[in-house]
């Protein structure tokens, strides 16, 4: 390979590596390992898992899983999935802001049969306030025994992401 062509190829490889490193440096991924359970009755029993949360300069993603441990199907709407910010760790009722999820990969099923799970990545635009406590929001859900839609806000909360922007 001629020296000029080799130099161009090496320069392109170095530039691509620097761009990838810059993108990685501006993101903060926190491994969470949260597992939470909702047991309303035999028909309404769900397990929620949050593996990790990644925040970058303009958006966020979370790797999550929902398992239907009940004995009847669970209807799922993705309209309220997202991140909720709270001013204290013990506040669950009044978020200061909610960042809704705009992406679901793979798509969330409309119905989750008993014993089945959905695992995927949710994400949205916006960056949580580093000074507030962040909880994940799932839902709304409905079952035969709980026909009124309900959401799940995680008991766990994350604080201080320290994003390098």
Image: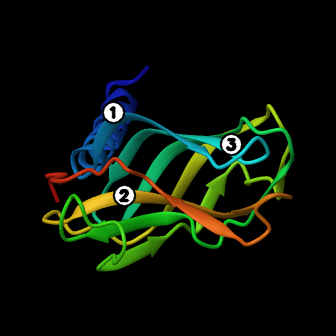
Residue labelled with disc 1: 4
Labels 3, 1: front one: 3
Residue labelled with disc 3: 45
Residue 14 in picture, x, y percent from top left: 28, 36
Labels 2, 3: front one: 3
For marks 3 and 1, the one nearer the N-term is: 1
Labels 1, 2: front one: 2
Residue 31 in picture, x, y percent from top left: 33, 34
Residue 87 in picture, x, y percent from top left: 19, 71
Measure how far apart labels 3 and 1 are at the Cα level.
65 Å
Horizontally, residue 157 falls left or right of residue 48, namely: left
Q: Image point 84% across, 38% down: which residue?
A: 71
- Note whether 124 is above or below 45 in the view shown: below
Horizontally, residue 134 falls left or right of residue 88, namely: right
Residue labelled with disc 2: 135
Quadrant housing residue 163? bottom left
Label 1 neighbour load within 10 Å: few <14, some 14-19, many 20+:
few
Of 162 and 137, which appears nearest the observer?
137
- Note whether 86 is above or below 38 in the view shown: below
Horizontally, residue 129 falls left or right of residue 5, namely: left
Q: Image point 54% across, 66% down: which residue?
A: 101
Disc 2 secondary structure class: strand
Quadrant housing residue 88? bottom left
Q: Is residue 58 visible?
A: no
Horizontally, residue 12 falls left or right of residue 72, namely: left
């Amino acid at each position: 390979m001629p020296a000029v062509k080799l130099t161009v190829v090496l320069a392109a490889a170095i530039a691509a590596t620097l761009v990838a490193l810059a993108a990685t440096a501006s993101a903060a991924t926190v491994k969470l390992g949260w597992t939470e359970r909702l047991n309303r009755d035999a028909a309404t029993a769900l397990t929620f898992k949050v593996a990790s949360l990644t925040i970058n300069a303009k958006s966020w993603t979370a790797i999550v899983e929902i398992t239907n441990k009940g004995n009847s199907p669970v209807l799922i709407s993705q309209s309220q999935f997202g991140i909720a910010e709270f001013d204290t760790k013990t506040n669950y009722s009044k978020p200061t802001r909610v960042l809704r999820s705009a992406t679901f990969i793979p798509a969330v099923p409309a119905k989750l049969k008993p014993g089945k799970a959905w695992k995927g990545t949710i994400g949205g635009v916006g960056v949580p306030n580093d000074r507030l406590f962040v909880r994940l929001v799932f839902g709304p859900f409905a079952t035969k025994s709980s026909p009124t839609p309900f959401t799940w806000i995680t008991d766990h909360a994350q604080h201080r992401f320290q994003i390098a922007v």
